[in-house]
Image (cartoon, rainbow, N blue to C red):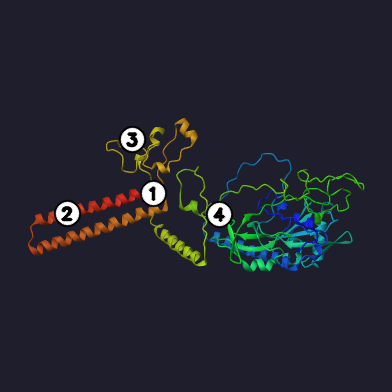
Amino acid sequence: MALNAATDQQYHLLDQDGTADNQMDQLQGDHDTVSRDAIGAQSHAEEDASWQAAKSTKKRKQEALERRRGSAGLQDQVKTGTPTFKKLPKLPPLPKDDYKIVIRPNQGLPLRNILTPTLAQAIIEACQAGIRDDHFILRINPGSNIAILSTKYEEVADKVRLIRALVLNGRAHAVRAYAANGDDTLRGVIHGVPMNTLTETLMAHLRVRTHGVGIITARMIGTTKSAAITFFGPTLPRTVYYYGGELRCYPFRPTIQVCKVCREKGHRADVCPHPDRPICRLCGLTNPTDGHPCSISCASCGEAHPTGDTTCKKRLKPPKPKQPQVQAGHSNKLQQGTSNDPPRTKNLRWFSSEEEENAYKSADDKHSSWLHSWSPGRKPHSPSKKHAPAPAQQNLHRSPPGGGAKGNGGDQGCTQQASSLQVTWAEAVAAKSACTPPITQNVHYQAVIAENKQLKQRLDKYENKIMWLEKQLAQLMGATPKTTVQASQNLTQAKSYGTMGTSNRNRHHHEIL
């Protein structure tokens, strides 16, 4: 989308978060900030693309929800420390799975002066009474001068996004409505794309090879050579492919909204509620006169550069740390020794081809079916009394299972390897660390135990058969009882040797764990 003025290159799209605290500020648009002259030239193709992306995101989230319901139940999220007293009450978040339609008025319409029910009635009239007031939730963000309509009905969202004007106080005001992306999407930026590339061209030739990640939509950022891509998945891919060429994908950094018309923060120039305010757009002087001494000053940081310049240190919002993602159902399968263990992050795979991805999925399915085959017969294994806590001095040097000297009795301490020992600096200084019992609820460990149990049963069965056959053979051949007893002793010795090998394998597997 070409812009008419060179200064419009400084405008960027704001990203969206999934938090409830700043949800209104995060849903402020999915397109570049454009000048007042370029608003009328918006392409319907881009609006349709955003609508298709919103429907695709809705469908993906419903499918993921059905998969989670079919598997283990959802885990309760641990609440982090929240302030006891809040200065201002925060509005509850809008329904997460609803369609979000952003209604952005043109310049000169301050939504802060309009009541929310009045705006809702105007929306119903603009849809020709095709929707009812119980079909949506409307919220006005006076700081950004936009309105957010949330609905779970696709028909309602489709009608609202086609609104081009609203009648308020007997006067028609031009507005622009479009569908916003969902909260579960990720944004990335790639560089080195030819300027003014169409969205259709980007979508036709962009590919990603990260497992579980897909491309929803892509667009160019203003008149630059950078493109913004919206992904659906658990993580942002490191690289994407455009026409087969590999490009590095960087996280999308949202910009702080600063209006170049009134020099106020919180909204963009195309929705400025005070377009006629007498103020110098370069230095910020109120009621300027012709020929006044003007020195360029940034409205964000106050330094000597234009507002929104790429060299501004306060142009971008600081990134927020994200909590590590834990594998779904992982805590149900593995019961860790202590509750202070850090959560395990999900290991994502990168594939160079679709064949490699399909091969990985098939191997993962076989591994899961093998684990489930051992699940019904497993029993919880209680730690032995020999694994009693020992003093901190003995915890620093742990001997492998069965490797201690004979005659130590209950003073052997923990039999876990030193590689799995986790001692904090406070415990080391206080010398009060205690040994943790070995992890006996591990799926692989329990599978080996069950396998050894079955092998032992089969060995006993074959032993009885061999002894019966030897007895029959002795009767037929006229062998003496001494020969039969000697054969039985040899068989018992062979059994003890095999059991020793199985025990060694169990010990080796436990050391790995």
Query: Of residues 354 and 128, which is closer to you in this image?
Result: 354
Mark 4 surroundings within 10 Å by alpha-carbon count, few (fewer than 14), some (14 through 19), many (20 or more)? few
- Proximity of marks 1 and 3: CB atoms separated by less than 8 Å: no
> Residue 411, which numbered label?
3
Query: Of residues 391 and 429, which is closer to you in this image?
Result: 429
Tag nearer the camera, 2 or 4 = 2
> Residue 512, which numbered label?
1
Query: Of residues 447 and 385, which is closer to you in this image?
Result: 447
Based on the displayed image, in which of its 4 quarters is residue 214 positioned?
bottom right
Tag nearer the camera, 4 or 3 = 3
**Residue type, numbered disc 2:** Asn
State the residue position of label 2.
Answer: 490
- Proximity of marks 2 and 3: CB atoms separated by less than 8 Å: no
Choose the circle earlier in sequence order: 1 or 3: 3
Tag nearer the camera, 1 or 2 = 1
State the residue position of label 4.
Answer: 74
Q: Secondary structure at mark 3?
A: helix
Q: Residue at x 36, y 54 (%)?
A: 448
